[in-house]
Image (cartoon, rainbow, N blue to C red):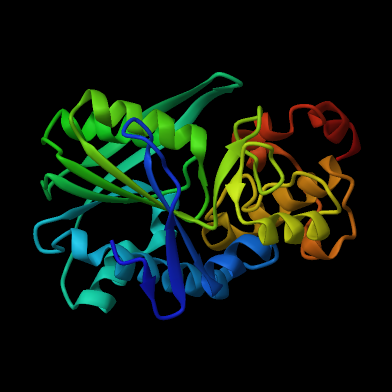
């Protein structure tokens, strides 16, 4: 692992043999992604690619792109652009496997995940996965499905925003199946809120630098708002949905009109946002009456 490259640094936060192997990356693209909740569209994609290129530079000494493969989790894994990042930084092609998953249930102590599509035509014992880590249920389901077809020895999990609880769940799964797991997270290993969605710098379980806590405290007026929202990646794949979810976040945290949500858009109807309803279930009935 290369801990220092131009414009970026890594710090290892795990301790003890049984803990997840987690590295936190610190660089400007990640700060833009995590501290600009109005960042969307092409500009958002550009910052994501820049962050992924730096991630690749940090761990390029630990894998061979020509023998490794990506396990691309649709649809949010698209914004990580790992194959493009690997191509730009190494000049080599990273083969790609595909899997589509979706949450079917969200509770405080359980997240149900269904697999609706898979294409594993690029077998490799070393996998790269780019995805937001919350509960860890999506990645364990994806690995379970992949392992039905191909063996896995190592997995590198790149997450702009990753929860410590999710990393532990994935790590435990990997230990049970003799898989070496390495996590590269952006800026923090987050505490996960009880709604299963919020990843906040202000959560008491979050491991991060004090400067990030101070920035989040100021930006969100002391509220434990998620650093990346409730549907990370929709900033580019479904910007209007993202802006509408931001409006509901502003309602939930009493931040309507705040600069952090200046581009939020009032929803016309709620059907588009049903998959994230568990994130705002405490105010859902009130919202239904207002919209």
Side of 135 relative to 231 (left or right): left
Residue 175 at what x, y percent from top left? 25, 28
The quadrant of the image that shows the C terminus is top right
- From the viewer's side, name the closer residue of 258 and 115: 258
Residue lying farthest to the front in this orientation:
16
Rendered view: 289 above or below 2: above
- In which image quadrant can residue 269 be found? top right
Residue located 72% across and 39% down the image: 270
Residue lying farthest to the bottom in this orientation:
6
Residue 112 visible? The answer is yes
Residue 194 at what x, y percent from top left? 66, 27
Side of 44 relative to 177 (left or right): right
Residue located 51% across and 65% down the image: 26
Side of 126 relative to 229 (left or right): left
Residue located 14% across and 40% down the image: 153
Rendered view: 29 above or below 208: below
Residue located 56% across and 55% down the image: 234
Residue 268 visible? The answer is no
The quadrant of the image that shows the N terminus is bottom left
């Amino acid at each position: 692992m290369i801990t220092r490259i131009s414009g970026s640094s890594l710090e290892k936060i795990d301790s003890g043999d049984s803990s997840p192997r987690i590295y936190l990356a610190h660089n400007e693209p990640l700060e833009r992604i995590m501290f600009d909740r109005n960042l969307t569209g092409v500009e958002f994609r550009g910052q994501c690619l820049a962050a992924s290129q730096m991630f690749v530079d940090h761990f390029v000494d630990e894998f061979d792109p020509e023998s490794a493969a990506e396990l691309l989790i649709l649809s949010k894994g698209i914004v990580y652009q790992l194959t493009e990042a690997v191509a730009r930084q190494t000049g080599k092609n990273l083969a790609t496997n595909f899997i589509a998953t979706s949450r079917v249930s969200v509770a405080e102590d359980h997240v149900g995940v269904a697999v609706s599509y898979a294409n594993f035509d690029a077998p490799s014992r070393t996998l790269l996965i780019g995805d937001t880590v919350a509960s860890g249920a999506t990645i364990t389901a994806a690995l379970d499905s992949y392992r039905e077809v191909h063996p896995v020895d190592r997995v590198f999990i790149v997450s702009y925003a990753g929860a410590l609880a999710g990393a532990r769940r994935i790590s435990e799964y990997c230990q049970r199946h003799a898989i070496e797991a390495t996590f590269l997270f952006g800026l923090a290993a987050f505490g996960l809120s009880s709604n299963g969605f919020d990843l906040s710098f202000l959560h008491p379980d979050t491991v991060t630098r004090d400067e990030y806590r101070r920035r989040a405290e100021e930006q969100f007026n002391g509220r434990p708002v998620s650093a990346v929202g409730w549907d990370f990646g929709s900033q580019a794949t479904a910007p209007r949905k993202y802006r509408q979810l931001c409006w509901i976040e502003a309602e939930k945290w009493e931040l309507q009109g705040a600069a952090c949500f200046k581009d939020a858009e009032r929803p016309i109807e709620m059907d588009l946002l049903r998959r994230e309803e568990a994130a705002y279930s405490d105010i859902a009935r009130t919202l239904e009456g207002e919209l």
